[in-house]
Image (cartoon, rainbow, N blue to C red):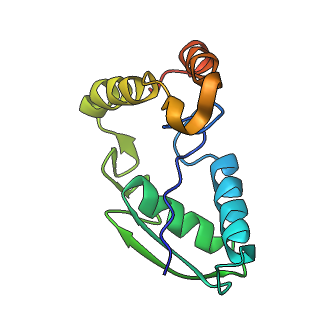
């Protein structure tokens, strides 16, 4: 078995800007990663996903797209109905308390610079672009 951890576009050491939870481009990226893994010489072509919370939602959403190499998913603390059964929503209404803590938490996560060891000399430019272009999570 091989385990691979992927930073969502615009988070951690990845490129780009994160604009919201679970956008289509995030699912597109997930499908592309699965296809890439399946084609590697060390891969048998069968891929599994495991995720908790956000990663669990990703697993459900990507599995619904049925990429050929994805054979199973394990999701924890996730749902297929985020507006009726999600930590941020109850019965389709966003929890008022989440508007502040979730927005400030996401701002803090996205304000962290990428790790120069992984992204090289471009880390500072990537960080500034992220700080200048990431919209608020409200």
Q: Quadrant of residue 122?
A: top right
Horizontal relation, residue 70 to residue 12: left or right = right
Relative to 120, is 2 on the left or the right?
Answer: left
Q: Residue 19: where, in percent of width, then height?
A: 59, 32
Residue visible at 48% across and 81% down? 1
Looking at the picture, tell me which residue is in the foreground, 29 or 104: 29
Q: Position of residue 106 (x, y in %)?
A: 40, 30
Give the residue at x 72% y 81%: 68
Residue under the point 36% across and 56% down = 53
On the picture, is 23 further left or further right than 107? right
Comparing 30 with 128, the one in front is 128
| Position above or below: 66 against 56 | below
The picture quadrant where one finds residue 128 is top right
* Direction from residue 117 to residue 101 in the image, left or right: left
Residue at figure coordinates x 52%, y 60% from the top left: 58
Q: Position of residue 80 (x, y in %)?
A: 47, 66
């Amino acid at each position: 078995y091989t385990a691979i951890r992927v930073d969502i576009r615009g988070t951690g050491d990845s490129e780009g800007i994160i604009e919201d939870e679970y956008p289509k481009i995030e699912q597109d990226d997930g499908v592309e990663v699965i296809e890439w893994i399946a084609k590697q010489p060390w891969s048998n072509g069968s891929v599994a996903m495991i995720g908790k919370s956000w990663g669990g939602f990703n697993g459900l959403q990507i599995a619904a797209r049925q990429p050929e190499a994805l054979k199973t998913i394990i999701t924890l603390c996730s749902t297929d109905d985020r507006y009726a059964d999600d930590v941020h929503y109850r019965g389709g209404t966003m929890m008022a308390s989440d508007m502040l803590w979730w927005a400030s938490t996401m701002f803090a996560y996205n304000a962290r610079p990428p790790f120069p060891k992984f992204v090289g000399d471009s880390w500072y430019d990537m960080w500034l672009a992220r700080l200048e272009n990431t919209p608020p999570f409200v």
